[in-house]
Amino acid sequence: MPRQPLSKPQGFTLIEVLIALVVIGIAMAAAVRATMAVTDESLTLRRHLAGNWVAQNHINGYVARGQFPSAGEQSGTEDEAGLSFAWHEKVSDTPNGSFRRVEVRVTAPGSDHADAILIGYVTNVPH
């Protein structure tokens, strides 16, 4: 009887499987890191957006109430979009007595880093 030639083994060797697992592991680690960076940026953008809403609410509040603010400073806290903010408002005179400059700085409570700084002008127009 003729001998049958030995067939080539099929499949992967242990070394090939281990190398493939290492490559997949490195790719997964890079994907997780990229996802974390995007998530952190998303939270930062959310804070900036909500902080701008807080500042706009302060300046627009004067207009909505028909108030002409006195020069001075005030501070407080406010919640917006499920986030807590500290705000500092500085109202100052302008060369034109019918205008007041209103600067609102919004931060995270206990932080010096501003999430938003908004400057607006309020007018004293007789109705």
Image (tube, helix red, strand yellow):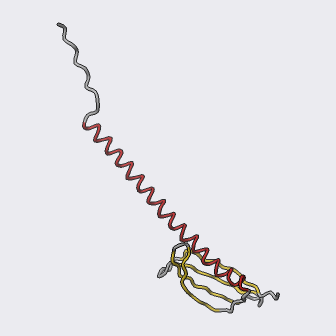
Q: In this view, does 46 lie above or below 35?
A: below
User: Is 107 situated left or right of 55 in this image?
Assistant: left
User: Is 60 situated left or right of 16 in this image?
Assistant: right
User: Is 1 situated left or right of 80 in this image?
Assistant: left
Q: Where is residue 12 in the image (x, y as percent from the top left)?
A: 28, 33
Q: Which residue lies furthest to the top in this view?
A: 1
| Quarter placement of the N terminus | top left
What residue lies at 41% left-to-right and 57% top-to-bottom? 33
Q: Which of these two is toward me, 7 or 19? A: 7
What residue lies at 30% left-to-right and 41% top-to-bottom? 19
Q: In this view, does 6 lie above or below 103?
A: above
Q: Where is residue 28 in the image (x, y as percent from the top left)?
A: 38, 50
Q: Position of residue 125 (x, y in %)?
A: 80, 86
Q: Quadrant of residue 101?
A: bottom right
User: Is 60 situated left or right of 47 in this image?
Assistant: right
Q: Position of residue 95 (x, y in %)?
A: 75, 89
Q: In this view, does 11 lie above or below 32?
A: above
| Quarter placement of the C terminus | bottom right
